[in-house]
Image (cartoon, rainbow, N blue to C red):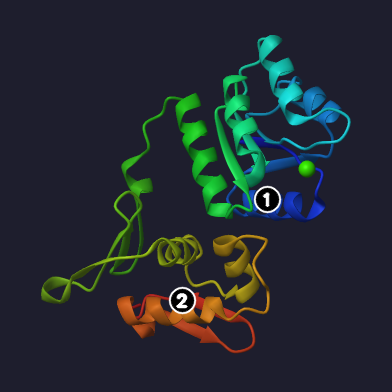
Amino acid sequence: MRILIAEDEPRISRFVARGLTANGYSPTVVEDGIAALDYATSGEFDLLVLDVGLPRMDGFTVLRTLRSMGHDIPIVVVTARDSLDDTLHGLEGGADDYLTKPFRFEELLARIRLRARERHSEPAPESSDTLTLGDFALDLRTRIATCGSGDERTELELSSREFALAVMFLEHPNQVLSREQLLTHVWGYDYDGASNVVDVYLRYLRKKLGAERFVTVRGIGYKLVDPAA
Ligand code: CA
């Protein structure tokens, strides 16, 4: 799936492009509204992530122009929180969804997946609703984690941050994920990089799911393993 990102802040476009690539999408970044319009009308993209505050032509104008030209490319509008009213107005101009800055990558990803699904009107395959590694399973709909087998099988509810972290680990089993990767992916680009919030949440996950599942790789980060493997 090819995704066009119209965003003039390199910090944000890099964050989004990196995350999309890691999730199997092909992102292309443009930095102004004229280029956004140009690329979006090329027919080469499946979805547009559109910042409102763009140089040369603002996002709303891009949106209205695209729709008035009859283009039905799904559009997720990204806006500053203090201009939310404008954004809601913008949705009437033909946006499919919106996000306010700062946003977590998971929030954007969820919206993109939803749009992609609607567009192809494909029901989600059963397997994509649950992520598993060994006896650890996570239901993406209910956010309930299960681990252990037989009589030892337990079900646990995860908080939204714990859930996002668990998803990240389950999507990259047996791979070392750095604190920076986890922080960017789960907390967003605006989070203080010096924070130990990742370690704090790792403690929560270990307590709920079993410490042996999360291996500390000194000086780098953590990896999720199947202790029975
Ligand atoms: Ca901007």
Type of residue at label 1? Val
Q: Quadrant of ligand 1?
A: top right
For disc 1, the marked residue is: 16
Is residue 115 visible in the rendered structure shown here? yes
Q: Which residue is mark 2?
A: 201
Work out whether 193 lies above or below 17: below
Dot in front, 1 or 2: 2
- Comes first in the chain, label 1 or label 2: 1
Task: Point out residue 16 in the picture as x, y percentages from the top left corner.
Answer: 68, 50
- Label 1, label 2: how far apart the Cα atoms are: 23 Å
Q: Nearer the viewer, residue 229 or 208?
A: 208
**How many numbered discs sit on the rendered protein?**
2
**Residue at 54% over, 71% down:** 175
Pointer 2: residues within 10 angstroms few (<14), some, or many (20+)? Answer: some
Q: Nearer the viewer, residue 30 or 78?
A: 78
In which quadrant of the rendered image does the N terminus lie?
top right
The furthest residue to the bottom: 218
Q: Residue 200 in the image: x percent, y percent?
A: 48, 81
